[in-house]
Amino acid sequence: MDFTQLDYRGNIFARAFSLENEMRFSFEMTDAACLTYIDDGSQEMISPNQNSTVDSSHTVLAKCGKYVTKIKGGGENNKLSGIVFHLNPEIIKEAFKGVNSDFLHASLSNGPSKSIVDLGSSRLIDSFVNSMRPYFCAESKVNDRLLGLKLQELVNILTAEGNEEVLYILGTIRHKEIFDFEDIIESNIYNNLSLEELAHLTNKSVSTFKRLFNKHFDTTPAAYFRNKKIARAAKLLSSSNLTIGEICWDCGFDSLSHFSSSFKKELSVSPSKYRSNHSKKP
């Protein structure tokens, strides 16, 4: 990974990055929300109860928590590139010293439970990101006073439209959501996650995850996910106009060959034959 970092009062404020194509990794954000702006490529972020795909010139805001990310390069160099802004509550308070910052005190009881907010494409954020680019190339150090003003500008842009989900994340950055084990599983059935990635999202070791899974579902993760995926695929084959390839990806299979072999093993017929036998006649 190549990156250039800007620090504000000893804390990371912004990081311009470039990553190689087709990577995936698990991580945890512990002390800051992150606003990710993608220049080239796409990034899928998966949390315990959500997933969001960020494409070129799009932005996503995510609060503290555990995530799995999948990246795909774009552009001439086939890389994922962009800028991540770290929104630490302490440095936001420092930047807003003497300025109203009531937005940092959202109500936990009334706020939405989203940990990821897809902000899509925004001209204001585009302009802000472009105004930041020269600072990553500057030979001399950018001072804290200037970065404090830029942090104020970014937060004001994010809060200007009164988006309740954005306000909730900014006001509860370090409040860790507690997710039900079964809800995490149901939210990620079709995300094609490994056992290690699922254990990461549930904040368990792999051995503990397996034990809890058997306790909740009375079967193994592999069998449970396979049955759910095949059932969904069968329903889509008989009731939708999606191609077999589209159904394969939609149901979380990693390849057409894997999908076809799993489907035939479970239902004793190929996906195409199943569609021919079960599709509704006009």
Image (cartoon, rainbow, N blue to C red):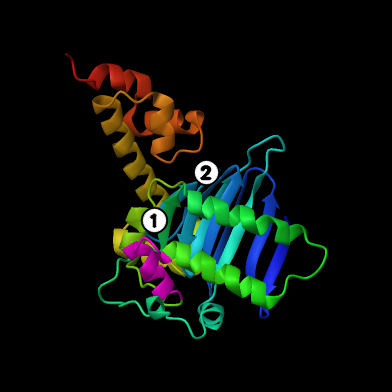
At label 1, the amino acid type is Gln
- For residue 272, side relative to residue 69 (left or right): left
- 189 to 206, vertically: above or below: above
Asked if residue 258 is among those painted magenta in the image, a careful observer would answer no
Q: Dot 1, how many residues are within 10 Å of its Cα: few (below 14), some (14-19), or many (20+)?
A: some
Picture quadrant of residue 138: bottom right
Left or right: residue 215 compared with residue 76? left
| Location of mark 2 (residue) | 55
Q: Position of residue 228 (x, y in %)?
A: 32, 44
Q: Residue furthest bottom?
A: 98
Check the picture and name the quadrant holding the N terminus: bottom right
Write the residue at 39% across / 52% down: 188
> Residue lying farthest left?
282
Q: Earlier in the sequence, mark 2 or mark 1?
A: 1
Tag 1's secondary structure? loop
Viewer-nearest residue: 72 or 34 = 34
Q: Magenta residues, as a range?
A: 159-173
The amino acid type of the residue labelled 2 equals Asp
Residue in front for this viewpoint, 134 or 3: 134
